Amino acid sequence: MDTNDKVIYLDNAATSWPKPPVVSQAMSEFLAKDAANPGRAGHRMAVAAEKMLDQARGQLTEFIGGTDSHRLIFTMNCTDALNIAFKGFLRAGDHVITTTLEHNSVSRPLQAMADGGFISLTRVEFSPRTGVIDPADVQRAIGPKTRLIALSHAGNVLGTVQPATEVGRIAQEHGVKFLLDMAQTMGVIPIDVVRQHVDMLAFPGHKSLLGPTGTGGLYVHTSVSVADLAAFREGGTGGDSSSPLQPRIFPYFLEGGTPNTVGVAGLAAAARYVQGFGPEKILAHERQLVQRFVDAAGDIDGVIIYGPTGANAAANRVGTISFNVDGHSPHEIGGILDEAFSMAVRPGLHCSPYAHKQIGSFPEGTVRLSPGHFNTSDDIDALVAALREITA
């Protein structure tokens, strides 16, 4: 039996599944026809590969309201994009503001820099009831050495959407750069990097964009110059090979080495699918499924739902919510759902220990439910029925 035989997959916050058929089709076609090393002045297959990358850059740049597609850097994932941004932009003595909502992809590199005495770090707390930070707390944390604010657009434990526009405005007013982590929102919540004052934006390809793993990107707005950055990795660029150092031009300054062209071909196809279907429709569907879970599971004795509850529990969420069952560890519930009911959820800390400390679920964490584009109401009803059986 296949591992996914009749499985109800509810772990889309980690990686979306299944993928639209156009994704594998695009990857297979590119691999069969044009999967040479991209090069602007090479043979026809190399030129075709470069053209595909450029078209994908343009498509994704338009997706986020960017102004220069050359500033869209392809990365291995969102973690890679965040590391490129932090380690390329921050300087000794800088102060950084982040939040307790953050994934370890943000928390760990910043904490390592702080522990090494390279930067100072402030974590703004969120409200466990609403799951949202107060922008005024961000403003109060700004000091004379603050150079960067790093914020997750939506947390991956509670799924609550953060006030990115307000934080971006505060950052601009104080001459501070703003980095937005769209790990949970790219593909479902519209963003305009110009209007919302986002200086750097990191995203994965494999979550709400419905693309393959091993893909992602970092957009560096024109408010950040190439002189503000250091190259995170150096290597070949497919273009200027004469310089002894990494050419200080976008995207090659931050994109050394052969890119994942096959993955990008799939990512571009996935993004076209998402744009054609409508991100707002995908988000509305996911919110409806989250609300259905809250409405049905909220009255099960022993089920604890974290973050906003009630009739508007999903109003400010992406398709993610956390719960626990009294008397059972999250891993026990996850194991029972997997083995007895063929349901894939995610138990544990979800790489966000500070968030779990704030909602009181540390160190065991929660069971995270994250329905996606291809889930149905029947999937949620089956989960609720399983929880009723477990608690009975």
Image (cartoon, helix red, strand yellow):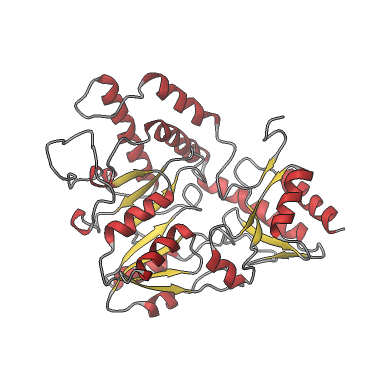
Picture layout, residue 27 above or below residue 310: above
Give the residue displayed 40% in from the left and 68% down from the top.
167
* Percent x, y of residue 239: 19, 34
Decide which of 119, 195 is in the foreground and name it: 119
61 sits to left or right of 229: right
Residue 307 image-quadrant placement:
bottom right
Residue farthest toward the front in the current orientation of the protein: 116
Give the residue displayed 45% in from the left and 43% down from the top.
205
* Percent x, y of residue 80: 39, 50
* Percent x, y of residue 287: 62, 53
Residue 193 visible here: no
Residue 256 image-quadrant placement:
top left
Residue farthest toward the right in the current orientation of the protein: 392
* Percent x, y of residue 78: 43, 50
Image quadrant in which the N terminus is located: top right
Decide which of 290, 300 is in the foreground and name it: 300
270 sits to left or right of 283: left
Residue 210 visible here: yes
Give the residue displayed 71% in from the left and 33% down from the top.
5
| Figure label count | 0
Image quadrant in which the C terminus is located: bottom right
Residue 160 image-quadrant placement:
bottom right
